[in-house]
Amino acid sequence: MGRIVLLATGERLVGEGVRAFDAVIAGLLETARREIQIAIYRIDASALPLLDLLEQAAAREVWILILVSALEDQPAPVRERLESMGRRPRVRVVDFRRAAGGLLHAKVVLVDRERAVIGSANLTWGGLVANHELGVLIEGPEAWEIGRLLDRLAEAAGGPYAF
């Protein structure tokens, strides 16, 4: 079994050995070597620095899949940024509701199929800073299995997970 680390947001939860979502996610994106998969319900402008890190990863030739619940429901600056990123080679942005139907409510960031963040936090100011959210960083073979599940979602939303 792999390693599990508790993550949180909110002043009553972070600290005393519990790491914050935003710093962990940023660290994962900065160190990605091959692949990043994200499944997310909501993104707001406070996550634009994370989108910067995704663009930097794309420039390093990292393959990126972003499954977003409903692209049209995201704030305009985020939607425009995701649409722009989706035109880059090696980046696939999928509007899950439009492509597969149904609601995608997952909050997952997976890097190199080795490390995954799963929790209740959206990529929003509330989810990353203000709310009291819980999650885990999973390292090891379980991360690979999470990648397989995200592959299934990508396949449901438009064919094989291929760029």
Image (cartoon, helix red, strand yellow):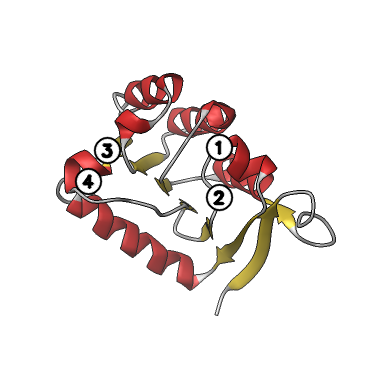
Residue 103: percent from left, percent from top: 29, 50
Q: CA distance from mark 1 to mark 3?
A: 18 Å
28 left or right, relative to 163: right
- Look at mark 3 in the image and give the residue it sits on: 95
Q: Secondary structure at mark 2?
A: loop
Label 2 amino acid?
Answer: Ala
Q: Rate crowding at label 4 as few (under 14), some (14 to 19) or many (20 or more) other CA atoms within 10 Å.
A: few
Q: Secondary structure at mark 1?
A: loop
Q: CA distance from mark 2 to mark 4?
A: 27 Å
37 left or right, relative to 129: left
Residue extending farthest to the bottom is 1
Residue 149: percent from left, percent from top: 32, 63
- Location of residue 122 with respect to 7 vertically, above or below: above
- Look at mark 4 in the image and give the residue it sits on: 162
Q: Secondary structure at mark 4?
A: loop
Label 3 amino acid?
Answer: Asp
Task: Give residue 121's mark.
Answer: 2
Residue 136: percent from left, percent from top: 60, 63
Which callout, 4 or 3, points to the residue nearer the camera? 3
Q: Rate crowding at label 1 as few (under 14), some (14 to 19) or many (20 or more) other CA atoms within 10 Å.
A: some
Q: Residue at x 30, y 36 (%)?
A: 92
